[in-house]
Image (spheres, helix red, strand yellow):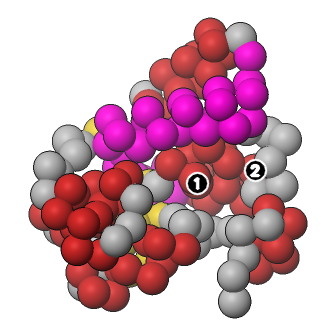
Amino acid sequence: MRLLDADILAYTLYEMSPAHPEAWTYLKNHVKESNKLYVTPITILETYNTLYHYYRVRPRENILTKIKLTMEILEHIETSIHGIEVAKNMNIPLGDGFLLATARENKIPVIVSNDQYVINAVDKYGLINENPISEETRILLGDYSP
C-alpha cells in the first residue's frame, strides 16, 4: 500500500516533464502488479493546480480528462484533517501535512514523493518514502538538494 504525492502524479500526467518516464513507469508497474496506490482529494487538487498553473497545460478539459482516467486505476482515500496539526508542528506545507497524517492514520506505510519536506518528515511518523525519480532526473528538475 502506497500513498501518492501530487508531484509524482503531476510528473506522470505531464509528458514534457523530465521526470515523466520514471513516474509513468512506476505507476504502470505498481498498477500492473496490483499494488494499491492511493490518492486523496487534496492530492488530486494539487496535481490539477500544478498542471494548470505551473506547467500551463491548456485547455482545462485536457487536464481533467487525464486526471479522470488516472483516478479510474487508483484507490481513493479521504484526507486526514489532522494534517493541519502535522504541518504546524513540522513547519511544512499544509498539503504535505495532510499527506503524512493520512498515511499514518490509514496505516499506509509508504509515501511516494519527490518532495524534500516529505522525505525529511517520514521517519518522524514511522513511514517510508519511496522516490521513483532518479538523482540525475532530480538535478534536471532543479529540485535536488543533497
Q: Place residue 57 in its image quadrant.
A: top right
- Indicate the amino acid at tag 1: Ile
Q: Position of residue 28 (x, y in %)?
A: 60, 50
Q: Earlier in the sequence, mark 2 or mark 1?
A: 1
* Numbered label attached to residue 20: 2
Q: Quadrant of the C terminus?
A: bottom right
Q: Please provide the residue range marked out in magenta.
A: 30-58
Q: Quadrant of the N terminus?
A: bottom left
Q: Position of residue 47 (x, y in %)?
A: 53, 38
- Indicate the amino acid at tag 2: His
Residue for badge 1: 8
Asked whether residue 46 is drawn in magenta, I would say: yes
Specify whether residue 141 is in view. Answer: yes
Front-most of residues 14 and 28: 14
Front-most of residues 99 and 2: 99
* Numbered label attached to residue 34: none
Q: Is residue 23 left or right of residue 79?
A: right
**For the point 82% across and 73% down, which residue is it?**
139
Q: Position of residue 133 (x, y in %)?
A: 69, 68
Image: 98 above or below 13: below
**For the point 35% across and 80% down, which residue is it?**
122
| SS at mark 1 in the image | helix
**For the point 48% across and 40% down, which residue is it?**
46
Asked whether residue 86 is drawn in magenta, I would say: no
